[in-house]
């Protein structure tokens, strides 16, 4: 396999973007990415989108996006793994270039979620659960993560305050991110007094519904060295793993085997251990998710995710900063775009261009993007190369 | 939705039928074509007791479409005596009094309906098991 570098990143400010359509978002992020790379060549396009069909009544993005981007006839595909679709699109682009099938691969993640009402958007998201044995019984994702949260609180003594502190920390980081949907600061009390959604999960424990897109351009390290526009950032490890779609079919609902395995596979490929990672962007779709992912990745021991968060270890200036971008909670969660935007943030940090939220001495970063209640997970390890 | 989408789940939803692997004896609910534990493809049908212990639960306040009139309502994961874990609503109880470890049993109940002229769906829900 050839060594791969990321030479371009593109996004826009996320939010409820009424004036922009699904295709507008994908094209804008892609154009920003190509401008950032200073390259106008794309050999293949992988598009991460969870459900253009439900949110927009629009499938067949493999035709639409290249055409509207000005790359008609270019090979393209849409890949889908629920909320991990974006990470999967980046992995797909990696394989295209690593295998030699393409030299320049664009990965774009997009989701336009506000063209439908809240109920329909929640329905669309719930299709990432087991329709016949979870959603059928009247449970949705806040409910599924609430099942995990209550079990975590009971087994490990994780507190309501610790859950809230994940949201507080991520809003503090998002406050420094000009592209975040909800950059407002949030207090523990605000989180803990927000509307109850699925006990013990409250509204401010949940990532929002968002319109947005993000894109990255991949090529070989050899090509990247010729371009010399940015410090070189390489993808040194990728892990992909899957698990049961239904939460109740896992032997231990407080373990996330897909995340553990994807992490181990990515670290093995990169020749690293979790201690070699300086910071991570993780999939905090709910506050409890960030805590459980920290534990599954081995950043902390099982049960220690809450205390470590409240102690400030995952803050921007902490021992292991998590979600410097603001995470899904503050930056927003346009599902198909999230995994690509995580890569955007890590590349920006490794280039040293993250402004007020820059992590000092960031050399090795990780992204963790998961689908559903942990039924699929894509992890990337990125490194700055001199 | 077409009737068949729900009709084909009838053995599980109406009768708690599960597939017991003939090789490793693992019980699969819902039934599958391949045993996830050992890879075998032969099963015998067994009916689950519906009795078990509450592993975790939530109380849904913001309900999905079709369930708003029930909210707030409890949903939990129950480990049945046979070792199978299933997710369902918990009803006929005060959600505030539920505790992890509670003994529950399934009852056949209405889940929801697809509008005024659509299908009415039935399946199992859990209720407290007083051993009566």
Image (cartoon, coloured by chain):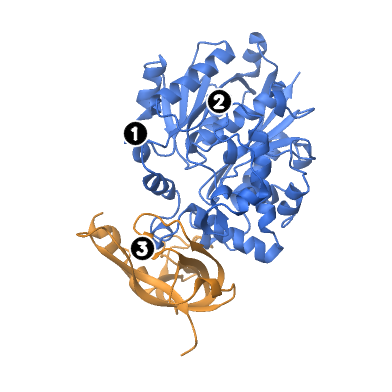
Chain colours: A blue, B orange
Check if mark 2 and mark 1 are on a common chain. Answer: yes
Task: Please name the residue shown 42% across and 32% down the image.
Answer: A78
Query: Can you say whether B41 is above or below A257 in the image?
Result: below
Mark number, residue A99 = 2
Query: Can you say whether A199 is above or below A177 in the image?
Result: below
| Dot 1 crowding, Cα within 10 Å, few <14, some 14–19, many 20+ | some
CA separation in Å, label 3 and label 1? 33 Å
Question: From where the camera sits, is residue A104 visible?
Answer: no
Mark number, residue A59 = 1
Q: Percent from the top left, x then y, of residue A130?
A: 43, 55
Q: Percent from the top left, x then y, of residue A67?
A: 37, 18
Determine which residue is flagged by label 3.
B69
In this view, the mark in front (3 or 1) = 3
Q: Nearer the viewer, residue A284 or A265?
A: A284
> Which quadrant would the N terminus of chain A be assigned to in this image?
top right
Going from N to C along the chain, the mark reached first, 2 or 1, is 1
């Amino acid at each position: 396999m050839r060594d791969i570098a990321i030479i371009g990143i593109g996004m826009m400010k996320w939010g409820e973007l009424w004036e922009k359509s699904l295709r507008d978002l994908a094209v804008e992020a892609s154009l920003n990415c190509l401008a950032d790379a200073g390259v106008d060549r794309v050999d293949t396009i992988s598009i991460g989108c969870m459900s253009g069909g439900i949110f927009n009544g629009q499938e067949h993005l493999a035709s639409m996006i290249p055409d509207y981007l000005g790359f008609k006839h270019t090979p393209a595909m849409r890949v889908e793994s629920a909320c991990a679709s974006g990470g999967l699109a980046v992995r797909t682009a990696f394989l295209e270039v690593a295998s030699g099938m393409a030299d320049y691969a664009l990965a774009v993640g997009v989701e336009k979620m506000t063209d439908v009402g809240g109920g329909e958007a929640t329905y669309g998201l719930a299709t990432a659960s087991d329709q016949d044995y979870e959603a059928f019984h009247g449970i949705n994702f806040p409910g599924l993560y609430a099942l995990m949260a209550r079990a975590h609180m009971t087994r490990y003594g994780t507190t309501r305050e610790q859950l809230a502190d994940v949201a507080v920390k991520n809003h503090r980081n998002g406050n420094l991110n000009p592209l975040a949907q909800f950059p407002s600061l949030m207090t523990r009390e605000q989180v803990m007094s927000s509307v109850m959604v699925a006990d013990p999960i409250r509204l401010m424990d949940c990532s929002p519904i968002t319109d947005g897109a993000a894109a990255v351009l991949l090529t070989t390290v050899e090509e990247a060295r010729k371009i010399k526009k940015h410090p070189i950032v390489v993808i040194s490890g990728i892990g992909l793993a899957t698990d049961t779609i239904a939460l109740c079919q896992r032997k231990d609902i407080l373990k996330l085997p897909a995340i553990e395995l994807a992490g181990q596979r990515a670290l093995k490929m990169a020749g690293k251990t979790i201690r070699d990672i300086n910071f991570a962007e993780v999939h905090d779709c709910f506050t409890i998710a960030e805590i459980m992912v920290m534990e599954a990745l081995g950043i902390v021991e099982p049960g220690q995710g809450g205390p470590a968060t409240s102690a400030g270890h995952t803050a921007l200036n902490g021992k292991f900063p998590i979600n410097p971008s603001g995470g899904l909670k503050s930056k927003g969660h346009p599902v198909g775009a999230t995994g690509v935007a995580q890569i955007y943030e890590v590349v920006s940090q490794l280039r040293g261009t993250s402004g007020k939220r820059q992590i000092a001495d960031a050399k090795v970063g990780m992204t963790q993007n998961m689908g559903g209640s942990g039924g699929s997970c894509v992890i990337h390890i990125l490194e700055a190369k001199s | 939705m077409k009737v068949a989408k729900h009709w084909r789940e009838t053995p599980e939803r109406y009768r708690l039928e599960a597939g017991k692997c003939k090789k490793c004896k693992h019980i699969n609910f819902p039934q599958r074509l391949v045993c996830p534990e050992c890879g075998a493809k032969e099963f015998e049908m067994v009916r689950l007791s519906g009795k078990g212990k509450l592993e975790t639960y939530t109380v849904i306040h913001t309900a999905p479409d079709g369930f708003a009139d029930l909210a707030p309502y409890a949903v939990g994961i129950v480990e049945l005596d046979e070792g199978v874990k299933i997710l369902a609503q918990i009803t006929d109880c005060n959600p505030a009094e539920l505790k992890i470890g509670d003994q529950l049993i399934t009852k056949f109940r209405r889940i929801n309906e697809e509008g005024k002229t659509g299908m009415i769906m039935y399946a199992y829900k859990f209720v407290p098991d007083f051993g009566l």
